[in-house]
Image: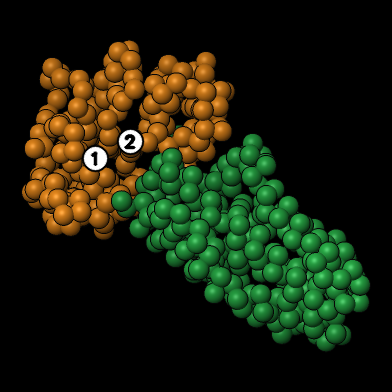
């Protein structure tokens, strides 16, 4: 036997979470169902007139995506901390930040990516013009990935707290506001015929910031949560 | 494994739980080829000492040294050398025994199917390897956790109540594993309140009170 390489170790974490999700698919699909239900309720509550819905479609999709991502975050690290897996990760001799980043990546693939994939269909139901699909998808790709990273930090901080979900929302929502503003703005600008490059670049900047600092913050927070 | 000369040392370690001062100036030296059993009644601080030694609790005063250097300074070396069997078994209920070992022991060592089968066989649950961990009995789960410890290929074993939930044969198994590990020059630090190698010549006791 030889010492495991870091890349392989991170891959094992990723693979493990996909395997677990496959066996618990009902829990994984919950955010997606929430997302579809919320966006479908809007025309019922406001107006079925597409020309009016179109105006708010970008905002509605973004709010729904934000909330359903939050819904999935609370349980991100909880089971691993409770069953003692996290202790073993902390002591594994592998850099904890990479393992956690890998876990967040699999979490995003299971909860964030499906939202992005289904968003053109949801958008069409709200009268979103075809030309804005690309902008919507790019903005949601960056936005949901950033949310998973920010949420990972929040989840790592609140994992030791009983009923931490309220605290988690309070921590993450303020940080997520710029994402919502820039994301929804990009879609609206595209629909108005302007270039959405500005807000998209800001989204990308926030994503890279979260990607570079997120693992450090998550591993520090997890160490504190495990030390009890 | 190159445990030759490895030394784990605790110097005047103190710990508080809330406002209770439970560990007072605990010191010990554990060298390669030695087994130390931490004994004492419930609530005396055995688990606290164990968690403090492996670094899952911050020390408040005193120091833990690995090969003469504070553990905090040689964290990577120490973690690589450490096999930790905690109070929880660290198993995923939805994964089979084999998968649990692959995904957790695999973080430390590059494993193939034979390695995993050998470890399962050694702890006596080879035939249960493909059953989800939720369907295993409490003793079988503990055996699975022991298999993970074996696969860690660690010099230093730190075990918190290793024989919990095990039957008589299981306790014998733990004793054999410890004997073999010590004979190979490994270090074992175990907290236990039941019988564990009580009349063996290799036993050293650390009594907490």
Q: Which chain is green?
A: A
Residue under label 2, please give it: B87
Tell which residue pokes out farthest to the bottom in this image. A194
Q: Nearer the viewer, residue B162 or B32?
A: B162
Mark 2 crowdedness (10 Å alpha carbons): few <14, some 14-19, many ≥20 = some
Picture quadrant where residue A180 is located: bottom right
Q: Colour of chain B?
A: orange
Image disc number at residue B47: 1
Residue at the location (39% across, 21% down)? Answer: B139
From where the camera sits, is residue A93 visible?
no
Same chain under badges 1 and 2? The reply is: yes
Relative to A108, is A16 above or below? above
x 18%, y 38%: residue: B43
Q: Position of residue B12 (x, y in %)?
A: 9, 50
Tell which of B22 and B56 is nearer to you.
B22
Residue B18 screen position, x and y as percent: 20, 54
Residue B161 position by quadrant: top left
Q: Is residue B18 left or right of residue A8?
A: left
């Amino acid at each position: 036997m030889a010492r495991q390489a870091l890349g392989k170790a991170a891959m094992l974490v990723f693979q493990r979470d996909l395997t677990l999700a496959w066996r618990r698919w009902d829990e994984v699909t919950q955010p997606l169902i929430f997302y579809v239900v919320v966006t479908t309720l809007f025309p019922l509550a406001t107006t079925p007139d597409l020309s009016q819905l179109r105006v708010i479609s970008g905002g509605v999709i973004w709010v729904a995506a934000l909330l359903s991502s939050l819904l999935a975050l609370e349980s991100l690290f909880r089971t691993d901390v409770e069953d003692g897996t996290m202790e073993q990760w902390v002591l594994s001799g592998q850099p904890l930040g990479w393992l956690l980043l890998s876990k967040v990546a699999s979490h995003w693939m299971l909860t964030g990516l499906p939202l992005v994939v289904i968003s053109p269909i949801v958008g069409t139901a709200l009268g979103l013009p075809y030309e804005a699909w690309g902008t919507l998808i790019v903005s949601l790709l960056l936005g949901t990935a950033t949310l998973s990273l920010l949420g990972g930090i929040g989840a790592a901080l609140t994992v030791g707290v009983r009923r931490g979900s309220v605290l988690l929302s309070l921590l993450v929502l303020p940080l997520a506001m710029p994402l919502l503003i820039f994301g929804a703005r990009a879609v609206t600008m595209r629909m108005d015929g302007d270039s959405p490059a500005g807000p998209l670049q800001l989204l990308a900047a926030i994503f890279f910031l979260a990607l570079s600092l997120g693992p450090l913050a998550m591993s520090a927070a997890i160490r504190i949560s495990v030390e009890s | 494994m190159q445990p030759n000369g490895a030394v784990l040392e605790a110097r005047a370690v103190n710990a508080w739980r809330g406002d209770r001062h439970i560990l007072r100036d605990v010191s010990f030296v554990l060298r390669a080829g030695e087994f130390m059993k931490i004994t004492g009644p419930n609530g005396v601080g055995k688990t606290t000492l164990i968690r403090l030694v492996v670094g899952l609790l911050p020390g408040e005063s005193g120091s833990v040294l690995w090969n003469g250097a504070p553990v905090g300074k040689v964290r990577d070396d120490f973690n690589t050398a450490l096999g930790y069997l905690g109070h929880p078994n660290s198993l995923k209920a939805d994964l089979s025994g084999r998968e649990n070992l692959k995904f957790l022991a695999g973080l430390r060592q590059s494993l193939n199917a034979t390695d995993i089968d050998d470890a399962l066989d050694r702890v006596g649950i080879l035939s249960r390897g493909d059953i989800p961990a939720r369907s295993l009995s409490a003793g079988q789960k503990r055996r699975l956790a022991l298999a993970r410890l074996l696969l860690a290929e660690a010099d230093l074993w730190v075990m918190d109540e290793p024989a919990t939930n095990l039957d008589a044969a299981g306790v014998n198994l733990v004793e054999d594993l410890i004997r073999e590990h010590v004979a190979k020059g490994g270090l074992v630090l175990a907290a236990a309140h039941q019988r564990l190698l009580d009349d063996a010549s290799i036993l050293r006791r650390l009594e907490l009170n």
